């Protein structure tokens, strides 16, 4: 079932179009990647979902109902540009922001204390924000985002500013939030974390959606019959062993093993490739090269941009 | 419990605005600078009130007092001190006054003769009002002398009454004679009035001065408060923007709520400060008055004369005294003038124009804060705000001289200048229809600026690293929600 649906959402600022009829669907309890180069319109879309700004055309449904003001209480948002009041005490500030999300003072204190214990940062409660390091502030900010137990969480570049240990901590928390029933929209430029965490993605470029779907399926769809072959003894040139139409993309070696990347024509199968090299090589491993999200991102965006240059 | 006439959404919105107001208010009143201002302000203001009184009671320059004593009782009794030289003269009052001219170091003390009662009235003529010290010395000397005469008379009366045979009072009898009734009978208050000689119209002039001072004081307060607290709103908005906390907050509340909460919160800080100033200033002045009561007798002058006329009801007041009482001394004139100002109107108008003017400008300050990335960038947008305010404050000086002129009336109608200009006019009296029109226009004015400001604000707070100009602001105002 869809937690969030955007239908042909368009947003313009004067002459500039920030979003052009973008549609997407986020299923419940999934982690959804919102991808795109800088300035593509991701933040505008996130702001529309948060009702910070409204769409010019189209609509956004949350649990199949059009967005309305009290939906802010079930959304948690960690913006990319984030910060806290520097002169205010950590605890007081967290209570204030939790109350703005609709929690009572009593509930806010109770839940915040719980989170502060969980992160082992109780000692920070009475400190001013300016006394904390950047990473510490990010932790407090994360707690503030989730303290009202939102059904929908929106993280914009959540890992920036964290050291690797805290990145792990945060990733585990995000996965636990999902297990506990939250739906998560996740915007990042870190494609490795997209592959690791996201179920579905949408790729936006220059206000337009250029790709969406399940991460695994997308990667499978973009499989272009490229294989990686690792082998030992080598008599003769690998290139001469390959049938015509088979393309040797790279061939390198370390001390013991050679590693070759080979792309074969669509109509051929992996068996043909194996049969042609098996008699000559001692094969250590043979596998499909599934393109990374990084590669797909770059090739998709470049293709679209090249087209638009050609058109103009 | 939801308030019955609000639906749940409105109740939640109100609650959030209240939370924002509370935060804005508490973080500011807890600041050290607020505490320091709250303490320093009243001390300065109390000084403004106390200093003139202190100066009036300070040691005089050397002064020559010509004494025309028609009774012959007192002239020899005034002793020359380091500061005062008393010279008995035998000229008539008119001649003496003519000779006096406008020499600030001379004065004429006139003690008129009386026929049916003790001579307990005197008038002092001078260009410069006499100090309380001098007046105190004259009245003391006179009342001591009168009391001496009265005592002698009482003793004579008692002796004749109780033991007519005796030629003189014995020591034992004398003790009885000093009864309480005698002490009461002989007690005398001397009524000394001071009159400024140089020109007539003193009274009217002092009234105008008091109105001018009151008007100028309150319009300055409004001018200062708008700048002071408007700048606080602007800095608060910039702080939220540079902290990058604003996007977190506007995901919970509407930008308009955040802006309004901040403006109202800061307004309440301003009102708190004003009320604390008034209370502390009053406390300081009252404490000082209690500690040095003899220096603040000016207010009691009228009462003294009424007591003295009770003591001597049969005395026909002479012409000079009537004139003196009509004119009063300068301090009394100022006090009369101040009490002739309609304070309930003045204070409620002050609060209304402070809040109205502050809301009008505060919204614009908030809009500027939202459009820039740091305080140094605010300069280019400050001009349209500061120009009308400073203009109003400068023009206020000439409005004081012509408070019913057409410029005064027009500028007290335009919302951008009315808070400052109207406060100048109110002590002189303003027709109610003008006051009402001006107030309605001010309300309409701040609703307009708040609307415009909120359009700029909601776009501006989320816009980073962009050089903004007026054209850009105009585009923001026209963006759809």
Image (cartoon, grey):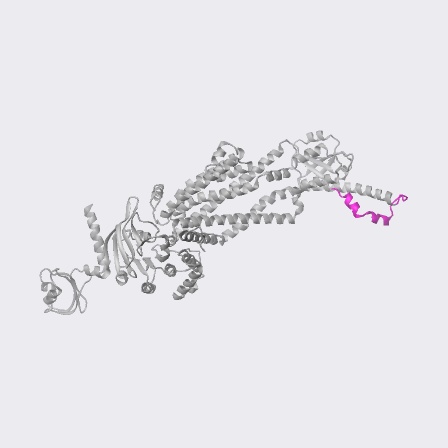
* Count of marks overlaid on the render: 0
Viewed as shown, does residue B279 lie left or right of B415?
right
Q: Residue furthest right?
A: B165
| Relative depth, front residue between A226 and B455 | B455
Q: Position of residue B220 (x, y in %)?
A: 51, 41
Q: Up-down: is B428 above or below B29?
A: above
The answer to whether residue B416 is visible is no
Say whether residue B166 is magenta: yes
Could you tell me residue A123's position as x and y percent?
Answer: 43, 64
- Residue B182, image quadrant: top right
Magenta segment range? Answer: B163-188
> Residue A148 at x, y = what percent?
38, 60
Residue name at image x 33 percent, y 55 percent: A80
Q: Quadrant of residue B332?
A: top right
Q: Residue B290 in magenta?
A: no
Q: x and y percent of residue A144 in the render?
A: 38, 59
**Of residues A182 and B127, which is closer to you in this image?**
A182
Q: Quadrant of the N terminus of chain B?
A: bottom left
Q: Residue at x 63, y 43 (%)?
A: B53
Can I make out residue B440 in this image? yes
Instruction: Answer with left or right where residue B103 lies relative to residue A75.
Output: right
Using the image, determine if residue B243 lies above or below residue B202.
below
Q: Along the horizontal axis of the image, is B150 left or right of A269?
A: right
- Front in this rendered view, residue B388 or B380: B388
Q: Residue furthest front?
A: B4
């Amino acid at each position: 079932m869809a937690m969030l649906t955007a239908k042909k959402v368009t947003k313009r600022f004067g002459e500039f179009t920030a979003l052009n009829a973008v549609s997407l669907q986020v299923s419940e309890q999934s982690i959804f990647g919102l991808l795109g180069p800088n300035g593509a319109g991701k933040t505008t879309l996130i702001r529309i979902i948060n009702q910070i700004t409204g769409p010019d055309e189209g609509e956004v449904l949350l649990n199949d109902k059009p967005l309305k003001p009290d939906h802010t209480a079930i959304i948690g948002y960690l913006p990319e540009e984030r910060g806290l009041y520097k002169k205010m005490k950590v605890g007081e500030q967290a209570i204030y922001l939790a109350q703005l999300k609709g929690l009572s003072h009593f509930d806010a204190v109770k839940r915040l204390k719980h989170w502060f214990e969980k992160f082992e940062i109780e000692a920070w409660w009475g400190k001013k924000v300016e006394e904390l390091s950047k990473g510490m502030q990010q932790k407090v900010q994360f707690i503030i985002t989730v303290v009202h137990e939102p059904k929908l969480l929106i993280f914009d570049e959540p890992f920036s500013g964290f050291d690797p240990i805290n990145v792990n901590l945060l990733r585990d928390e995000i996965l636990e939030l999902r297990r506990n029933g939250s739906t998560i929209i996740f915007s990042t430029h870190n494609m490795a974390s997209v592959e690791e965490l996201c179920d579905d993605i949408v790729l936006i470029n220059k206000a337009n959606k250029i790709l969406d779907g399940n991460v695994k399926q997308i990667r499978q769809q973009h499989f272009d019959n490229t294989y990686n072959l690792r082998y030992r003894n080598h008599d003769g040139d690998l290139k001469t062993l390959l049938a015509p139409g088979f393309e040797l993309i790279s061939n390198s070696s370390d001390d013991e093993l050679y590693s070759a990347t080979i792309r074969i024509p669509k109509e051929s199968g992996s068996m043909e490739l194996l049969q042609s090299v098996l008699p000559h090589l001692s094969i250590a491993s043979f596998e499909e090269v599934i393109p990374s999200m990084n590669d797909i991102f770059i090739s998709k965006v470049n293709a679209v941009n090249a087209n638009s240059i050609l058109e103009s | 419990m939801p308030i019955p006439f609000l639906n749940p959404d409105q109740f939640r919105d109100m609650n959030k605005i209240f939370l924002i107001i509370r935060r804005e208010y508490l973080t500011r009143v807890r600041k050290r600078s607020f505490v320091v201002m709250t303490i320093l302000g009243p001390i300065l203001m109390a000084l403004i009130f106390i200093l003139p009184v202190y100066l009036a009671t300070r040691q005089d320059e050397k002064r020559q007092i010509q004494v025309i004593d028609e009774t012959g009782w007192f002239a020899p009794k005034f002793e020359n001190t380091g500061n005062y030289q008393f010279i008995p003269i035998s000229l008539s009052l008119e001649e003496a006054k003519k000779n006096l001219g406008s020499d600030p170091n001379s004065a004429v003390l006139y003690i008129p003769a009386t026929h049916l009662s003790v001579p307990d009235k005197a008038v002092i003529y001078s260009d410069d009002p006499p100090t309380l010290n001098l007046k105190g010395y004259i009245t003391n000397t006179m009342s001591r002398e009168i009391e001496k005469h009265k005592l002698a008379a009482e003793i004579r009366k008692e002796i004749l009454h109780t033991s007519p045979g005796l030629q003189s009072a014995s020591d034992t009898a004398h003790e009885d004679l000093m009864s309480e009734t005698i002490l009461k009978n002989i007690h005398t208050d001397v009524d000394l009035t001071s009159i400024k000689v140089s020109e007539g119209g003193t009274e009217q002039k002092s009234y105008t001065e008091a109105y001018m001072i009151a008007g100028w004081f309150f319009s300055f307060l409004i001018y200062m408060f708008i700048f002071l607290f408007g700048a606080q709103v602007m800095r608060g908005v910039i702080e939220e923007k540079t902290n990058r906390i604003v996007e977190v907050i506007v995901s919970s509340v509407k930008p308009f709520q955040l802006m309004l909460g901040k403006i109202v919160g800061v307004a309440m800080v301003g009102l708190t400060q004003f009320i604390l100033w008034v209370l502390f200033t009053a406390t300081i002045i009252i404490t000082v008055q209690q500690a040095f009561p003899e220096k603040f007798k000016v207010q009691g002058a009228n009462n003294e004369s009424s007591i003295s006329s009770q003591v001597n009801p049969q005395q026909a007041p002479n012409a000079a005294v009537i004139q003196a009482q009509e004119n009063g001394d300068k301090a009394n004139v100022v006090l009369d003038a101040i009490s002739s100002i309609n304070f309930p109107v003045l204070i409620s108008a002050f609060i209304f124009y402070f809040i109205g003017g502050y809301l009008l400008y505060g919204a614009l300050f908030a809009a500027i804060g939202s459009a820039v990335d740091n305080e140094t960038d605010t300069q280019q947008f400050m001009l349209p705000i500061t120009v009308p305010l400073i203009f109003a404050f400068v023009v206020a000086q000439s409005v004081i001289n012509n408070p019913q002129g057409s410029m005064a009336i027009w500028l007290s109608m335009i919302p951008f200048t009315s808070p400052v200009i109207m406060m100048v006019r109110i002590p002189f009296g303003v027709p109610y229809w003008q006051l009402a029109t001006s107030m309605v226009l001010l309300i309409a004015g701040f609703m307009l600026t708040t609307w415009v400001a909120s359009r700029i604000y909601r776009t501006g707070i989320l816009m980073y690293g962009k050089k903004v100009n007026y054209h850009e602001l105009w585009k923001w105002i026209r963006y759809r929600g």
